Amino acid sequence: MWIAVLATLHAQPALAQDCFKIVSRRLALGDSITATLKDGSIVPGHYAGFQGQSLLIRDLPDAPAGFQPRLLALESLRDVRFREKTRPAVLYAVGGFLGGAIIGASIAAAQPGGGELRGVGIAASGLLGGVAGLVVGLVFPLRIPYARLVECN
């Protein structure tokens, strides 16, 4: 039993170090973050790096008057939230265009009749579907919250 207690007490600094590593690896200077302290208070700001064993958060442009940059000791942090970087929008745009083009052309090809201009109608439907898919591929990822929570203690 004492071994379990000692292991738990020993694991706390390691958890803080993991928090330090994850945050410093995933964030660039100036990224927006929100730190929650063990007492429940929330500190919003921009990531400004680490000084020793403390997280430095600087002022947000829309912060209340009197907000000062803060050094938060890793031991006082409960968690840190930040927005994860997303994949390049080009990937979503290309995927949306291809998906929309296939769906548009398939719907047009499934329609009966059409005569001599059937191929033109299928191509036009594919192009219109592709443009619609392109728009969805560019806008949809912006609406997905890629928030990341790093528990520190």
Image: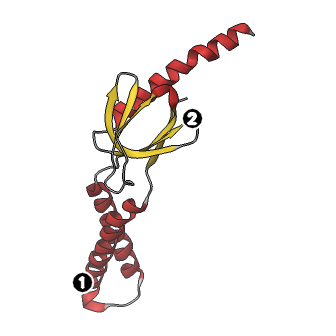
Q: What residue occupies the far top of the structure in this picture?
A: 2
Other-residue count near label 1 (Cα within 10 Å), few / some / many at <14 / 14–19 / ≥20: few
Residue carrying label 2:
38
Q: Give the residue drawn at x 52%, y 24%.
A: 15
Badge number at residue 25? none
Q: Nearer the viewer, residue 149 or 121?
A: 149
- Of callouts 2 and 1, which one flags the residue occurring earlier in the amino acid sequence? 2
Q: What residue occupies the far front of the structure in this picture?
A: 66
For the residues labelled 2 and 1, the Cα–Cα distance comes to: 65 Å
Q: Quadrant of the C terminus?
A: top right
Q: Locate residue 131, reporting x and y percent.
A: 28, 73
Q: Locate residue 64, reporting x and y percent.
A: 39, 54
Q: Locate residue 123, reporting x and y percent.
A: 26, 78
Residue 142 seen by the camera:
yes
Which secondary structure, mark 2?
loop
Q: Nearer the viewer, residue 101 or 67?
A: 67
Q: Quadrant of the N terminus?
A: top right
Q: Locate residue 120, reporting x and y percent.
A: 24, 83
Which secondary structure, mark 1?
helix
Q: Nearer the viewer, residue 118 or 94?
A: 94
Mark nearer the viewer, 2 or 1: 2
Residue carrying label 1:
120
Vertical comparison of 82 with 135: above or below: above
The colour scheme is secondary structure
Identified by mark 2, the residue type is Lys
Vertical comparison of 118 with 53: above or below: below
Residue 82 seen by the camera:
no
Q: Is residue 11 left or right of residue 108?
A: right
Q: Quadrant of residue 94?
A: bottom left
Identified by mark 1, the residue type is Val
Q: Give the residue drawn at x 69%, y 13%.
A: 4
Q: Give the residue drawn at x 42%, y 80%.
A: 110
